[in-house]
Amino acid sequence: MSGVRPTRAARAGRAVVVALALLWSLGPVAYGVVLAVRPYGEVTRDPLGLPTTLDLSAFATAMRDEADGGFGLGRFVLNSLGVALGTVLLSVAVCVLGAYAAARLRYRGRALTNGIILAVYLFPGIVLAVPKFVVLARLGLTSTLAGLLVVYVAATVPVALYMMRNFFLALPASVEEAAIMDGCTLGQLLVRVVLPIAVPGVVATAIYVFMIAWNEYFYALLFLVQRRGLWTAPLGIAQLGDFQVPVTVLLAGSIAVTVPVVIIFFLAQRYIVSGLVQGAER
Amino acid sequence: MTAARPTTARARENRTGWLLVTPSLAVVALVVLVPFALVVVFGFSEVRLVDIPYLGTEPITWSLDNFRRAATSQAFWGALWTTVLYAALTAVGSLAVGLVLALALRRPFRGRGLVRALLLVPYVLPVVAAATIWKTLLNPQYGLVNAFGRAYLGWDTPVGFLSTTSAEVWGMPVPVALLVVVLFDVWKSAPLAFLFLTARLQSVPGEIEEAAALDGANRRQTLRFVLLPQLRAVALLLLLLRFIWSFQTFDDVYLLTEGAGSTQVMAIQVYTELVTKADIGSAAAFGLLMSLVLVVLLAGYVVLSRRAGEGP
């Protein structure tokens, strides 16, 4: 068995690889944070310098309304939050039942619906952007947050179905079988038995859907670029990059919209990861 | 009576199954099948953005012009080649980085859980935030890379990493901007490959490795002949998925370069046809041709992997 244990050299080598990996993953992010807390003049004068004082004014400038001399990111964040939460509610509500049926019930056509779920999950999205844009423009929804909500639900339903089906498949079926033996109706079964044990999976899926909607840029650009009042946070940051906005303010904004998703992702990390990679073990 | 019960139970399960799955299928049909039918219609007709208010009220004029124009345009073939190169390099790069990370973190050590979580940060980061940071990092005036290069590596002039189509490095032409965009995408997507590979590695039974060690295999042989073969299937799957996803990337490339420095990928072409040229038909045709290329490449992959599977 001693042959399996790593040698001293192997352990030192691994420490180097781990250090490099952390530098590669976190280096750029750390750089962004460092610049965001330095005054703009100092950054352009001495690009390689470290912060001497902690200057948080860039965050305030980014968030404040245009009327107060800021860049209105606070409003963009609220727009994003509304659309993202709406997407989560609708997408999860639509998917939770379908995912359960796809995972558990033996109805005719089950193999077909499962195949459709997987195919849709892998379908190239950009091709469908053109017709979606045209249809929503015809309905007069392309310069509204409601139109964006429709597109986000559409974009997240396949992923949510796929993830939640994986979670249901991983749950033991014996509890439900016992409940059915005891004469539970379908409604009782779903509300009293299935949902309580599925909560972690539903929450993880909801968080993943939230992240997709919160981070989305392409449709926001396509639909709302002319409507500054309705910009989402990603669109706002990208658009401000084209104006004469100090880079420290842009980075402060970027960090500000990143922190919430990173935190909630790490809180639910284990569940999200298992929902994503299930099936890869084989 | 008792003989009939299983049938009714099955019929009920059948009915509830359809009842539960119908909302999901309805949404899928509405957001995938209907748009797909429409994109085909648009591709074969002359529709522009100004026609939108009249859509559905006027008869469609069918034509093949959109495809004819695309097939004869330099922009289309250029974008296709750029996209294939971009997707292939990204797929290989993110698999390679993911593999190194997964192997390095395979054995438990103190703080491994934290390291693992931190490695996921680039994947979780909003793409806009990531692109803003990278653009700053590579900025010719105050970016870290150029400042470092000029202070310590003796660069005479700043390098426009995101706008330079090609530069000579040791006498070889290097597509600078394209490689930077690939590197960015590898940075963002390698964590996902790392997750999949780690999951697969964890399910390799420890006995196989121990048996190999007892038979006198050294560490490199164990890796080469025991672990890597176990990862083959998931690695191929990851290559395929990353290729499909990168093939249609818009955000990463558009945010970093807006297509400058010869990074006009297909998705940016579709966007340009739709928004800048206001030509719905042409955008739809570009999108359809893009899917066609993807389908052909996938079919080729399936045939090749079948043939490889039949071998010894």
Image (tube, coloured by chain):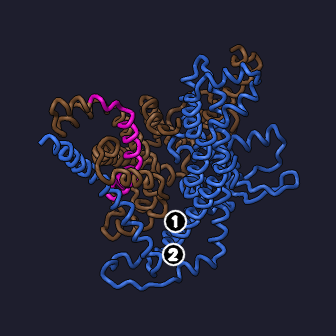
Chain colours: A brown, B blue
Residue reaching furthest to the left: B1
Q: Is residue A158 magenta?
A: yes
Measuring 62% from the left and 30% from the top, which residue is drawn there?
Answer: A51
Q: Which residues are magenta?
A: A146-175
Measuring 40% from the left and 45% from the top, which residue is drawn there?
Answer: A162
Q: Nearer the viewer, mark 1 or mark 2?
A: 2
Q: Is residue A49 magenta?
A: no
Q: Amino acid at mark 1?
A: Tyr
Q: Main secondary structure of the magenta part?
A: helix
Residue reaching furthest to the top: A2
Residue named by callout 1: B271
At mark 1, the secondary structure is: helix
How many numbered markers are drawn? Answer: 2
Q: Residue A188, located in which quarter of the rendered image?
A: top left
Does B170 sit above or below residue A256? below
Q: Residue B190, located in which quarter of the rendered image?
A: top right
Measuring 63% from the left and 43% from the top, which residue is drawn there?
Answer: B94
Instruction: Quote the CA–CA distance across marks 1 and 2.
Output: 10 Å
Q: x, y (%) of residue A174? A: 30, 29
Q: x, y (%) of residue A171? A: 35, 32
The dot on residue B282 is 2
At mark 2, the secondary structure is: helix
Q: x, y (%) of residue B8? A: 17, 46
Does A133 sit above or below residue B22? below
* Residue A196 seen in the current view: yes
- Image quarter where the N terminus of chain B lies is top left
If you read the primary sequence from the N terminus, does the residue marked by circle 1 or circle 2 appear first?
Answer: 1
Image-based side of A149 in relation to A190, left or right: right
Image-based side of A166 in relation to B165, left or right: left
Q: Amino acid at mark 2?
A: Ser
